[in-house]
Image (cartoon, rainbow, N blue to C red):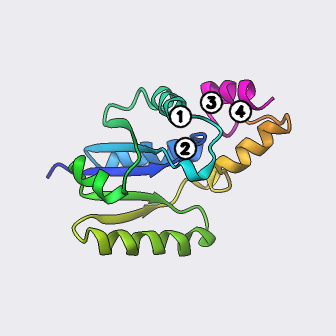
């Protein structure tokens, strides 16, 4: 069976935690579609095209990965990509309630598309894009949390 999974997110910016989940997903699925959400209501630091470029650069060595931007309902995007699954990451118990609500709604909208959850390696469980942006904005070192191209983009944009 050829399994495709969509891993959606804003990825503003992509962190080592995101990258860890993608690499682990590549061991489980034939095709991992990293779906970079436009999400205009979120007030992102980077434009959609910039985020797609950063994510593509970080994941360029992963043969099963495709990076695609989207601005529609996630389940509609999953259908267009012929994906059977949606992958979501859970860092802590606090993430679960929100993720459970999303997965329940997606199941209502498209019962044939399942949501699965992975937890990041413990080394990355505390990393979030918002924390990385804040540390960078305040002049801190984010090199342990993001890839070098992302660190450089943050430095250019936030300092």
Q: Quadrant of the C terminus?
A: top right
Q: Nearer the viewer, residue 116 or 6?
A: 6
Q: Are marks 4 and 3 in contact (CB under 8 Å)?
A: no
Q: Are marks 4 and 1 in contact (CB under 8 Å)?
A: no
The residue wearing badge 4 is 143
> In the figure, residue 113 lies in which quadrant?
bottom left
Q: Are marks 1 and 3 in contact (CB under 8 Å)?
A: no
Q: Earlier in the sequence, mark 4 or mark 1?
A: 1
| Magenta stretch contains residue 154 | yes
What's the CA distance linking mark 4 and mark 1?
18 Å
Q: Earlier in the sequence, mark 1 or mark 3?
A: 1
| Magenta stretch contains residue 31 | no
Q: Nearer the viewer, residue 11 or 29?
A: 11
Q: Earlier in the sequence, mark 3 or mark 2?
A: 2
At 79% from the left and 34% from the top, the residue drawn is: 141
Q: Earlier in the sequence, mark 4 or mark 2?
A: 2
| Residue found at the far front of this picture | 41
At 64% from the left and 50% from the top, the residue drawn is: 123
The residue wearing badge 1 is 51
The residue wearing badge 2 is 11
What's the CA distance linking mark 4 and mark 3?
9 Å
Indicate whether 143 appears above or below 134. above
The residue wearing badge 3 is 150
The percent coordinates of residue 151 (x first, y second) are: 68, 29
| Residue found at the far left of this picture | 1
């Amino acid at each position: 069976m050829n399994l495709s999974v969509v891993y959606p997110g804003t990825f503003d910016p992509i962190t080592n935690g995101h990258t860890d989940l993608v690499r682990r997903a590549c061991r489980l699925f034939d095709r991992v579609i990293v779906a970079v959400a436009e999400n205009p209501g979120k007030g992102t630091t980077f434009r959609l095209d910039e985020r797609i470029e950063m994510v593509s650069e970080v994941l360029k060595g992963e043969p099963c990965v495709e990076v695609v931007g989207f601005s529609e309902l996630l389940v509609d995007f999953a259908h267009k990509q012929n994906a059977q699954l949606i992958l979501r990451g859970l860092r802590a118990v606090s993430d679960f309630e929100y993720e459970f609500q999303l997965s329940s709604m997606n199941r209502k909208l498209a019962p044939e598309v399942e949501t699965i959850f992975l937890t990041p390696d413990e080394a990355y469980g505390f990393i979030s894009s918002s924390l990385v942006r804040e540390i960078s904005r305040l002049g801190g070192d984010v090199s342990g949390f993001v890839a070098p191209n992302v660190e450089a983009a943050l430095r250019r944009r936030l300092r």
